Image (cartoon, rainbow, N blue to C red):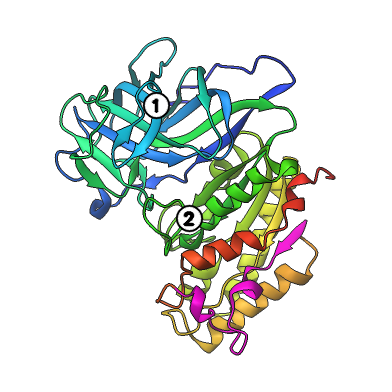
Amino acid sequence: MSGVLMDKSKPDSEEDKWVGTWATALQQVEESNMPPEPGLSNNTLRQVVRVSLGGNRIRVKFSNEYGNSELTLNLVQIAVSSGKGKVKSGTEKLLTFEGKKSVTIPAGGTVTSDTVDYCLPKLTDIAITIYFGNAPTVLTGHPGSRTTSYILPGNGIDSLNISTAVPTEHWYVIAGIDVITCALCNAVVALGDSITDGRGSTTDMQNRWTDNLAKRLQANTATAGIGVLNMGIGGNTVLQGGLGPSAVERFERDVLSQSGVRYLIIFEGVNDIGINNNLKVTTDLINTYKSFIDKAHANNILVYGATILPFGGSQYDSAINEQARQTVNDWIRTSGEFDAVIDFDAALRDTKDFTRLKEIYDSGDHLHPNAEAYKKMAEIVDLDLFAKNDR
């Protein structure tokens, strides 16, 4: 693949395989979400992510997909985060790339680190610290990190505590973490918009619905081998007109190309309905869901459809939009196209007015759930869905 630095690492045996434990959906970073001063070039960035699966051998992925020039990573270190820009002493380890400590990623390219022996406990907050060389003026990243990152002038790769560095609530360049694990382990991708991305959750608390689902999966013996990959983008659409690449455009990258994917939850469409304000969008959404299901099934992936949440009282509220939402939800529930249905709508709607979120679950804008709702959403997911292997 032109412009892409490929990983050559392999699991130790046919009984082992790579499975994603954390990943994020990438987009071109908008001007308003670019790194604050001093910026990334020749400086240090520490970013924190929470993994789902644990393991003893890992690899980390980085991206310059939307960059307009080369991106140089002089040094990259992983360590267990102690919170607020700090890492736990003794857990630090430098990554290498084809045996070298530095790597230059061409514009449009991606790179995966060499496999590294590392004790990675499940549900751990990991700090990825990068000392940059040159960085492009157009960056690849994920604006909706809901997690604080820290920018420090110069080379701070060995600093245990950079809590006084410049904070920013965005991720840049990092794309995913895989672990080598047993052949029976798998990953679930949650494909979605701002509700999956975690709008309404609490910064640095890791309480998106996907985080809560990961906790439940890890606490359950039958599903403890399932990694959770959050592929939500705020303002995203299935079709076109939203923020970031549409779900149609990113389906190959964010679903089919992720490591060890066996399950897919499709929970997207509210922005398509809201910005189109017509009923034609229902046909377009349903046909696209069908195409996603076909592509996933062709790759041995089970697909679960999640119903679209109420938005009464929000900026999307209109009679025609509510009709569209009900039409799409009816199809999700009754068509039989999905391998199973996760009815978030029924779990969170007001029992007296189905067009609105229940007040205790409303973040305040009548569109996005709050942290309590994200807990509820995870609770209603049937964990048996992730022990299925019957397709």
Q: Which residue is mark 1?
A: 78
Residue 203 lies, with reference to residue 221, above or below; the image says: below
Q: Which residue is found at the position 61% from the left and 90% from the top?
A: 352
- Using residue 36 as the reference point, say whether residue 90 is left or right of it: right
Q: Which residue is found at the position 72% from the left and 40% from the top?
A: 299
Counting other residues with Cα less than 10 Å from the Cα at mark 2, is it few (<14), some (14-19), or many (20 or more)? many
Position of residue 363 measured from the top left corner of the image (x, y, whole percent):
43, 72
Position of residue 36 measured from the top left corner of the image (x, y, whole percent):
19, 46
Mark linked to residue 207:
2
Q: Secondary structure at mark 2?
A: loop
Q: Secondary structure at mark 1?
A: strand
User: In the image, what residue type sits under mark 1?
Assistant: Ile
Q: Is residue 4 magenta?
A: no
Q: Nearer the viewer, residue 89 or 310?
A: 89
Q: Nearer the viewer, residue 103 or 18?
A: 18
- Using residue 12 as the reference point, say whether residue 210 is left or right of it: left
Residues in magenta? 338-362
Residue 233, quarter of the rendered image = bottom left
Q: Which residue is found at the position 66% from the left and 66% from the top?
A: 286
Q: Nearer the viewer, residue 388 or 307?
A: 388
Quarter of the picture holding the C terminus: top right
User: In the image, what residue type sits under mark 2?
Assistant: Asn
Residue 144 lies, with reference to residue 126, above or below; the image says: below
Q: Which residue is found at the position 45% from the left and 21% from the top?
A: 113
Task: Work out how far the residue at label 1 is from the one at label 2, CA to CA, in angstroms.
Answer: 23 Å
Counting other residues with Cα less than 10 Å from the Cα at mark 1, is it few (<14), some (14-19), or many (20 or more)? many
Residue 138 shows in this picture: no
- Using residue 82 as the reference point, say whether residue 220 is left or right of it: right
Closer to the N terminus: mark 1 or mark 2?
A: 1
Position of residue 73 measured from the top left corner of the image (x, y, whole percent):
31, 24
